[in-house]
Image (cartoon, rainbow, N blue to C red):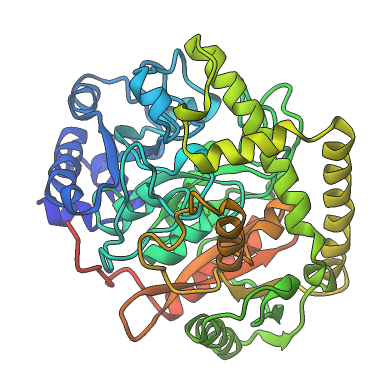
Amino acid sequence: MVAEFTNMDATAQAELIRAGQASPVELVDAAIAAIERVNPQLNAVITPLFEQARRIAKNGPIGDGPFRGVPFLLKDLVCASGGDPIYNGMRFLRDARFVAPYDTYLAAKFKAAGFICVGKTNTPELGLNATTEPEAFGATRNPWNVGHSTGGSSGGSAAAVAARMVAVGHANDGGGSIRIPASECGLVGLKPTRGRVSLGPDIGDAWHGLAIEHVVTRSVRDSAAVLDAIAGEMPGDPYAAPARVRPYAQEVGAAPGRLRIGLMKRSPQGGAPLHPDCVAAAEDAARLLESLGHQVEESHPAALDEHELIDRFTEVVCGHTALALEQIGALVGRKIERGDVELWTWNLAERGSQLSARQYLAAVGWIHAWARRVASWWADGFDLLLTPTIATPPPPLGTLVVDREDPAAGWARLMDVIQFTPPYNATGQPAISLPLYWNAAGLPIGAHLVAAFGREDLLIRVASQLEQARPWQDRRPPVCA
């Protein structure tokens, strides 16, 4: 029964419970058994919450949400569940045994949807890398090849979902942290529109609007239905996404119409050349879209080739890293010193501390103006942009660990890999990575689709169409529950 339950997506698991064919206790026990079986090989779950999950499954409160009784995993970053540990990938918080005092809005919405959290997943320190290899908890390994990265910063959740520990894993995305792990682990990774999911009550706009919350899943319908459950601004939120026309779950299977899609299969901003496998993945997705009746042509926003974006993006991240260390130190009651965090984190925070208010605001203003230049491409008649999700197949572990002697080189190496994801954190547009391609080595490589601001509905329709045309549900990694 463990294999039967864990191979289902969350929608199917919830249907079993509603039909009385399985109980929340059975599903939670199956998830725990799956974690115990494969997590020692992957190091995806760093904080088990097994007994608490069993107690909730048996006694409630579960409510009557759409995912009542379905087990899931919470990423150990930003989204805090009251009474549970939250470490943000930090040795500092781990050693302080820090426990969240209350639920964030998102954690409360996950609970209202009926999810039962069975544990917390690994993440790089403060989510500051595109590989999940924190010093505090060690590397998470890719279930498709344990010598390779899962991506980051939601790499723990992605490895767990790909390996069938659970069907849904919480994820967030400030520069690609939903889409990068989805690409590297063969999953669906939808980054919603800015303002679609509230970050409150303590955060108004993470990284000045660059970051957004959602999940990684194995099916498009799960991604859509979870977004229905967690979407919606809360009182006082600084941003509000355009209203949904109807529930996102109703977009699954709906015809997208004939779309005009731009294809970009070279590096933006003069970045490092793309790996041939990633070019092949984009070309393959383009052919599949054409076979479904869409018009695909090589085109992309000219602003993507402006070199200044990464510099301005980096300034925003550095400023917020400096602030985060100050705030976390205040929570624990001790100022964070250099030895309390990874060298890479300290380097970013130092750079952030040296920024003047004028420099920071100039960076934000530049990003806003640049975003308008990018968005005009969609306004001029394109529906979607197709790119590889990242510029390489899943890299070997250690490749993106920042060198202690040369942090600048480490940052440049990271940016070469994630060229296609940060731009849409800057613009706030929705984007999705889909598992349509595996290379000769058996490693997944995502296809990345970007829609206009507020158009998750269109992404879900075309993603569902692609999923039907080339199903991926039966592809299982070598390390699998």
Q: Is residue 435 visible?
A: yes
Which quarter of the image is occupied by the C terminus? bottom left
Which residue is painted at 16% across and 33% down in the image?
Answer: 25
* Left or right of 456 in this view: 76: left
**Quarter of the view holding residue 128:** top right
Residue 220 makes an appearance in the image: no
The vertical placement of 4 against 107, above or below, is below
In the image, taking residue 44 as reference, residue 106 lies left or right, namely right
- Horizontally, residue 66 falls left or right of residue 164, namely right
Instruction: Give percent across and percent down for residue 380.
Output: 88, 72
Q: Tell me: 364 left or right of 22.
A: right
Residue 238 x/y as whole percent: 76, 30
Residue extending furthest toward the front: 405
Q: Closer to the camera, 410 or 274?
A: 410
The picture places residue 429, in percent across and down from the top left corner, at: 71, 55
Nearest the camera: 369 or 227?
Answer: 369
Residue at the outermost top position: 333
Q: Is residue 304 above or below residue 129?
A: below
